Each structure stands twice: as C-alpha cells, then as structure tokens.
Image (cartoon, helix red, strand yellow):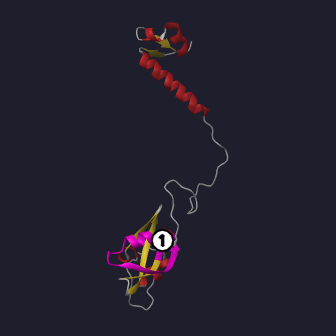
Amino acid sequence: MSVRDIAKTFGYSQLHKRCINTGGIVIRTRGAMLLATALVAGAALAGCSSSDSTSSDATPSASASMVGGMTECTEAAIKPTLEQGLAKDVTLMSWDGLSCADGWAVVGATIGDGEHGAPTSFIFEQEGQFWIPKKQADVCGTVNNSSATPAYPADALIPEALFEGGCLAG
C-alpha cells in the first residue's frame, strides 16, 4: 500500500489523529506526510535526470563565453584601467605599444600634463574579466643592475617574455 493510498483511505483530515505504518516509516502528522511525499517525489525526479554521454572541452579560453567573463589583451580592454589609475593632473598622451603573455600585459605609453610627457611602462595582470595594475617593485623580482642586460630574476612574477619591456624600460 502506498502513502497516497493510505492518505486516500483515511483522508488528510484524519492523518493527524492516526498513526500510519507505511513499510517501516511511521507518519504521525499531516506535515510529516507532506514532507515524506516531497522527499519521495524529489528522489523520483532526481532519478529521471539524464546526462549526455558526449563531453565537450571545458578548458576556458579568452574567446569563450564564461560565467563572469574573461578579458582580452587589447587596448580597448586595458586602456580604461590605465586611465583610471593615473593621478588627476596626469593624462594619457599616447598609447605606444602593448605586449601580452601568460595572463600578463605590458603597456608602453606616454603620460604627462598634456604639454610635456614621458614614456612609461605599465604592468597589468589578468584576473578573470579584469586587468589589475601591478607595480614594478612587486612583480619584477630582484633585478641585478650590475650588467648592461640584467638577467631574468628567479623571484620575478611577470613572465620572462615581458620582463624587459615591463621591468627594464621607463
């Protein structure tokens, strides 16, 4: 006999007064009866779910549509972050170059007061859909300036491909 048959037999109004034994499960109140019915229904629905036996490549890429999104290494993606980080009296006079490697970017730009400018390197690290500005002192490692071309430091965080442009230039 099912829970539904018992409920029909005694009626929902009588369930709170009777103790119904349903295959080892004792239901004493209407609330417990409804809970038991919901649990059985939930288990039945879970058993009905299906999955596709074919799988797709789950490796994210910069062009993939992802929850939260990914950013691209482009001037359009990085320039707003660069401009927001400049002091009030400093403007971006020119965008001179962009190099990207392994989730990092180095921007060569000229900044100044609008009349006079200086070439400057800016370092960014990709974090999901954002480019996070980084300071040379924090990511370039311990640079040995005793030689004309310093070697890539073992403690550097920036990729070696971007080391010279990001850490040794302006």
Q: Position of residue 124 (x, y in %)?
A: 44, 71
**Residue drawn at point x = 54 percent, y = 55 percent:** 66
**Residue drawn at point x = 61 percent, y = 32 percent:** 48
Q: Is residue 126 among the parts visible in the rendering?
A: yes
Q: Is residue 157 among the parts visible in the rendering?
A: no
Residue 89 shown in magenta: yes
Question: Which quarter of the figure is the C terminus placed in?
Answer: bottom left
Dot 1 lies on which element?
strand
Q: Position of residue 92 (x, y in %)?
A: 41, 78
Question: Which quarter of the figure is the N terminus placed in?
Answer: top right
Q: Of the residues shown, which amino acid type is indicated by label 1?
A: Trp
Q: Which residues are magenta?
A: 79-106
Residue position marked by numbered label 1 in the rendering: 104
**Residue drawn at point x = 54 percent, y = 29 percent:** 43
Most foreground residue, 142 or 31? 31
Q: Alpha-carbon neighbours of circle 1 within 10 Å: few (<14), some, or many (≥20)?
A: many
Q: Position of residue 157 (x, y in %)?
A: 43, 72
Question: Hey, which quadrant is residue 49 in on the image?
Answer: top right
Most foreground residue, 10 or 95? 95
Most foreground residue, 24 or 126? 126
Question: Hey, which quadrant is residue 44 in on the image?
Answer: top right
